[in-house]
Amino acid sequence: MAAVLIMLMMGLRQARADVQRVPTVFTSAGQEVIMPCSNVAHNSCSFTTWLYSNAGHLGTVQEVANGKIKPNAIRGQRLRVGPDCSLHITNVTTEDAGLYTCQQFLTETGPRSGEDAPVYLAVLHMYSSSEPDLETAGEVTLHCLLHTHDKCGGTVKGKDVHLLWVEQSRGELHSNTDHQIRTTSVCDITLRMLKDSNHTRSQKTWQCQLIVGGKVMVSISYSTHASSSSYVHFVLRSAVICCLVVAGVLVTVMQRRRADARQQTTNIFVIHVSQAASPPDELETIC
C-alpha cells in the first residue's frame, strides 16, 4: 500500500513538473502572436502538424497538416506557418487561448519524429461594465482577465504570474477612498473607481499589467474622461441662474417701457383737454 502511494505521489510530481516545463506565450487581444515549434526535425516544414485544444471545444482540432493551413480550418484566415515551423496568429481573440502542440513526421503518412512540442497561449483582455452615464459621473468599473486553456490552472502555475493595476501618475494602485481593487484569482482583477463629489477627475490612463517572473509581460490601457457630479451640477446651476437674471432684466425693461408709454398717453390727453377748454373762456372775455 505504501509503495502504491509513493508511486502516485511521484506521478503527481512528474505531472506537475511536466506542466511547469510547458512554456506559455502571453499576449493581449487584438495582437499578433507567434507560437514556437521547438521540435523541428527537417530543413523544411513539409511534415509539420499543429494541434489546437481549447476548453470550449469537445476535443483537439488539427489546423495545420503537412506544413499547410487546412482548408476547413475555422481560423484559417488568421493563421500561417512561419519558415521555422512556428504558428502565427493575427488579431488574437480570447477564444484563441488554449494548448497548441507542434508535431513532426518523417513523411506525410510516416511515423512521428521526436516528441511533441506543446505550448500554451494565454490572452489578456480588459472591458468596462459601467454605463456611459455612470462613467460621466466618475463611476467606472474595469475588469482585467487572463484567459487560459484550463481556467487559470497549469498554464500559469509555477510561473510567478499575477495581475495588478497601475495609474500613470501614482504607480501601482491599492484600494482606498478613491477606488477599490478586487482580486478574484491570479487571472482576474477588477478596478472600481468610486464617485467623488469633492473634486473633478481629469483625463487619466489606467493600465492593467500582467507580471511574469517579476517583469511586465503584457499591459492594456484604458483612458477615462470622467467629471465629478458636483462640477456638472455647478454648471447647470450657473446656467439656470444666468437665465433667471436675464429674464428678470427683460421683465424690468418691459415694465418700465409700458410705464413710460402710459405716462406719455396721460400727458397727451391732458394737453388735449386743456386745448379744448380754452375757446369758451375767450368768448366770455369778449362779451
Image (tube, rainbow, N blue to C red):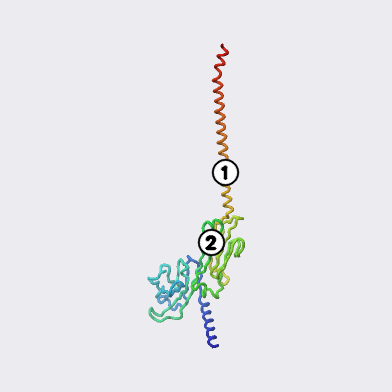
Instruction: Give, as a three-letter code, the residue at label 1.
Output: Leu
**137 relative to 255, above or below:** below
Q: Is residue 50 visible?
A: no
Q: Residue at x 55, y 25 (%)?
A: 269
Disc 2 to disc 1, C-alpha distance: 41 Å
The disc label shown at residue 244, or none: 1
Q: Position of residue 97 (x, y in %)?
A: 48, 70
Which quarter of the rendering shows the N terminus?
Answer: bottom right
Q: Residue at x 58, y 58 (%)?
A: 195
As rendered, which of 267 and 46 lies closer to the eye? 267
Q: Position of residue 18 (x, y in %)?
A: 51, 79
Q: Residue at x 56, y 46 (%)?
A: 240
The residue under label 2 is: 222
- Is residue 111 rendered to the left or right of residue 194? left
Say what secondary structure mark 2 lies in.
strand
- Is residue 47 rendered to the left or right of residue 198? left
Q: Position of residue 95 (x, y in %)?
A: 46, 69
Say what secondary structure mark 1 lies in.
helix
Sequence order check, earlier mark of 2 and 1? 2
Instruction: Give, as a three-letter code, the residue at label 2.
Output: Tyr
